[in-house]
Amino acid sequence: MFTPMEPEEQAEHFRRHCEKIKTGKTVCYCKFCTDAINMGGKTGIHLIELLFTKSGEEYDKL
């Protein structure tokens, strides 16, 4: 699970993982998961970003 990888290997690993996700945007609760989703080619949105958007402000990543 936590096998060290070169950055290129990581990107390929997360790209393959993101192929299984049917939407272009994914909400994550972990910073590292958000980074991995972004690295894999999808848009990762951290849950905190959604919770603490100012009232009346539209969230631009959605």
Image (cartoon, rainbow, N blue to C red):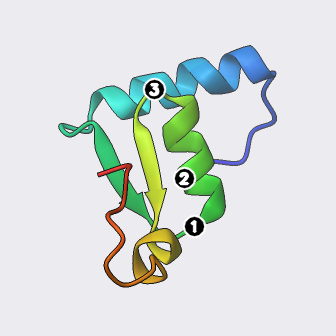
Q: Is residue 48 left or right of residue 62?
A: right
Q: CA distance from mark 1 to mark 3?
A: 17 Å
On residue 7, which mark appears? none
Residue closest to the eye, 21 or 48: 48
Looking at the image, is mark 1 or mark 3 earlier in the sequence? Answer: 1
Q: Is residue 17 left or right of residue 30?
A: left
Residue closest to the eye, 59 or 51: 59
Figure check: 61 above or below 42: below
Figure check: 27 above or below 14: below
Which element is circle 3 on?
loop
On residue 34, which mark appears? 2
Q: CA distance from mark 2 to mark 3?
A: 11 Å
Which element is circle 1 on?
loop
Q: Position of residue 45 (x, y in %)?
A: 44, 56
* Residue that label 3 marks: 41
* Residue that label 1 marks: 30
Residue positioned 26% across, 39% down in the render: 21
> Is the Cβ of the residue at disc 2 closer than 8 Å to that at disc 1?
yes
Q: Is residue 54 left or right of residue 39?
A: left
Q: Give the residue type at disc 2.
A: Thr
Q: Give the residue type at disc 1.
A: Cys
Residue closest to the eye, 34 or 57: 57
Q: Position of residue 46 (x, y in %)?
A: 50, 64
